[in-house]
Amino acid sequence: MNKYKTLLFLISFLFVQTQSSQAEIIDSCVAVVNNDVITLSEVNEAGQAIFQRIAEQVPSEQLGRALQQARHTVIEKLIEKKLLVQQAKLMNISVSDEEVDRALQRMLEQNNTSKEKFRDELTKMGMTEKQYRENLRDQILGSRLINYEVRSKVIITEDKILDYYDQHYTEQVGAGGYYILQIGIRWDKNGAPENPLTAKKEAKKKAERILSLAESGKDFKELASQYSDLPSAVDGGDIGVFQAD
């Protein structure tokens, strides 16, 4: 996103005059991304879960530095989100509430859990369902924006398509057009695991099981909808049609 012009004003403030003519801080402006403002309250809301976890787990002598680093990370993510939304608006790309509903339902089915248990887990993480849904929306929006950028800029030669994509579940549509389908498995989809090595091994086993199902003739789109952790799962793993030149 570095190609988009971004103007940041760090630690500037919004003031309101009281009757006694004293300035009172109503919120702090942490950053300005083009014409959009990121406030301190947005940072606190977006980082509530991780700030809470740090406060509970990090020793007091390291707490200040850990929170500072976490806030910096949260601000960077909010800047990326603003840029993402701005660019999506320019391209008329959006994600409906119904699409977010489907993505959430797929997540519940994949984890074999109920809505009530899911909400309990969110509470333990210090996250609201609204925040989780917005994260899902951002993931889907980001995936669509990236796919749009790829389709508009990447030229795939016929030789490369024949040598690779035809062997990895592509479907030819019309003259020179190809549907590209994908499945992705994340090992950190529920946040940073206690044992990353074990989580990666489990993700690899899951991927191998899915590969076996695909090779046995199972419908790839159904497998993507059921098992993929990528935002494109809501579309059956379909990231669009690529034209071969």
Image: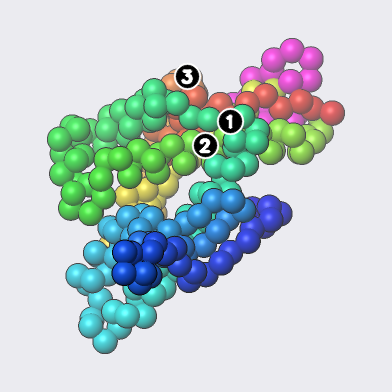
Q: Residue sitting at 23 percent across and 83 percent down? A: 60
Q: Nearer the viewer, residue 95 or 15?
A: 15
Mark 1 to mark 2 CA distance (whole Å) = 7 Å
Q: Dividing the picture into quarters, in which one does residue 73 lie?
A: bottom left
Direction from residue 51 to residue 72 in the image, left or right? right
Among all residues in the image, which is located at the extreme top?
Answer: 174
Amino acid at the residue labelled 1:
Ile
Q: Is residue 30 above or below residue 211?
A: below
**Mark 1, other Cα within 10 Å: few <14 / some 14–19 / many ≥20:** some
Residue 219 disc label: 3
Q: Which residue is mark 1?
A: 93
Q: Earlier in the sequence, mark 1 or mark 2?
A: 1
Residue 57 picture quarter: bottom left
Query: Upstream in the sequence, badge 3 or badge 2?
Result: 2
Q: Which residues are magenta?
A: 161-177
Q: Is residue 26 above or below residue 102?
A: below
Under circle 3, the secondary element is loop
Query: Whole-Å distance between the Cαs marked 3 and 1?
Result: 28 Å
Q: Disc 2 residue type?
A: Leu
Residue 141 numbered tag: 2
Task: Tell me the residue at 32%/55% (across/down).
Answer: 45
Residue lying at 27% horizontally and 40% vertically, measured from the top left: 129
Rendered location of residue 27, percent (x, y):
38, 62
Q: Residues within 10 Å of mark 2 (few under 14, many from 20)?
A: many
What residue occupies the far bottom of the structure in this picture?
61
